[in-house]
Amino acid sequence: MQLKSKLITFGGALCFFISVKVLAADTLNAPAPVLPGLYADPHIAAFGKRFYLYPTTDGTVGWMSTHFTCWSSADLVRWKPEGTILDLPKDVSWGPIRAWAPAIAQKDNRYYYYFSADVNIGVAVADKPTGPFKDALGKPLVPKGMLRGQMIDPMVFIDDDGAAYLYFGQGNCNAVKLNSDMVSYDSTAIISFKPQGYNEGSFVFKRKGIYYLMWSEFDTRDPRYSVAYATSRSPLGPFTRATSNPVLKASGVVKGAGHHSVVQVPGKDEWYIAYHRFKIPDGNGYNRETCISPMRFDKDGNILPVDVFEKVKPVTIRRLK
Ligand code: FUB
């Protein structure tokens, strides 16, 4: 063999071994999901000295689950099942299937659980974060077909002044201030907009006076499913898309990373992002699992890219005065 062709063969083999090694490292380094089994669209929150996760139950083609569960943790690493907190056929008269993408909010020692049911949005109320939750209205808070796109994926953000805002929708991002009862709003005040790339799964939080609107791009069955964000000085915008998007995306064996939520460790500038990815191995958009990774900011408040291979270390919530 000529020296040149030997070098080409050697180079090719080297590239092959390097790429196999990188993939193998990705496979080995993907952290285990935080919840056992198939759960998607995790909504994470901290109440008192515990963290809570409210996911969609996954594992059926067409996302046909009919019940919602809750999980709690003292450290973000070990999660305790709190059981079923809302069972659509039993607890909700108007939407028996497609139990999707819930969100939680707390006000005056009551817990408001916003959920998608058969492509409507409902709200249920409880005295504890673990329920049992009771349908507050006996009808949808946002009925199917009310606006363009699917009426799914609610998120409620409560501002420092106590005002609560509902964000929801697939296709468009819709937003409206909730009335003080947390279960009604002025429908003529709804604003609808579509940040570039927006598909679904909006989430809002505030840090150092800046409102962050985050969302998922692409379809949840697409391995490119990912999370982007925009910022504003007001909870209802206008929002300016960040230049460093997406901040959460597929990498190596991690595919379809999206539909997320964010939690701040109470009393600290320490943040975590909960999200789902295709189950590893052999998952897809109907077989997703829930993960948590640290989420950090640069000195200007930009969200830094999330490392989906970074393992969450135990976190403690210290008692706030
Ligand atoms: O889990 C069912 C649906 O898939 C959610 O409502 C969407 O956001 C997508 O994650």
Image (cartoon, helix red, strand yellow):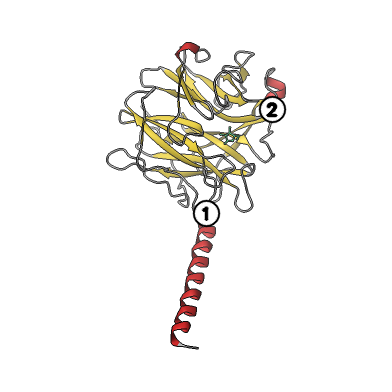
The local secondary structure at tag 1 comes to loop
Q: Earlier in the sequence, mark 1 or mark 2?
A: 1
* Quadrant in the picture for the C terminus: top left
Farthest residue toward the bottom? 1
Residue at the (41%, 17%) spot, across then down: 163
The local secondary structure at tag 2 comes to loop
Q: Nearer the viewer, residue 188 or 247?
A: 188
- Residue 180: x and y, percent? 46, 12
Residue at the (45%, 51%) spot, across then down: 310
Q: Is residue 159 left or right of residue 276?
A: left
Q: Look at discs 1 and 2 and give the one toward the viewer.
A: 2
Quadrant of the image where one finds ligand 1: top right
Judging by the rendered image, the residue that carries numbered circle 1 is 30
Residue at the (35%, 38%) spot, across then down: 242
Identify residue type, mark 1.
Answer: Ala
Residue at the (46%, 37%) spot, across then down: 197
- Residue 124: x and y, percent? 59, 19
Q: Nearer the viewer, residue 244 or 183?
A: 244
Q: Is residue 186 visible?
A: no
Judging by the rendered image, the residue that carries numbered circle 2 is 97
Callout 2 environment at 10 Å: few (<14), some (14 to 19), or many (20+)?
Answer: some
Q: Is residue 135 left or right of residue 29?
A: right
Q: Which image quarter: residue 99?
A: top right
Q: Nearer the viewer, residue 75 or 111?
A: 111
- Residue 70: x and y, percent? 59, 32
Rounded to the nearest angstrom, the CA distance separating label 1 from label 2 is 32 Å
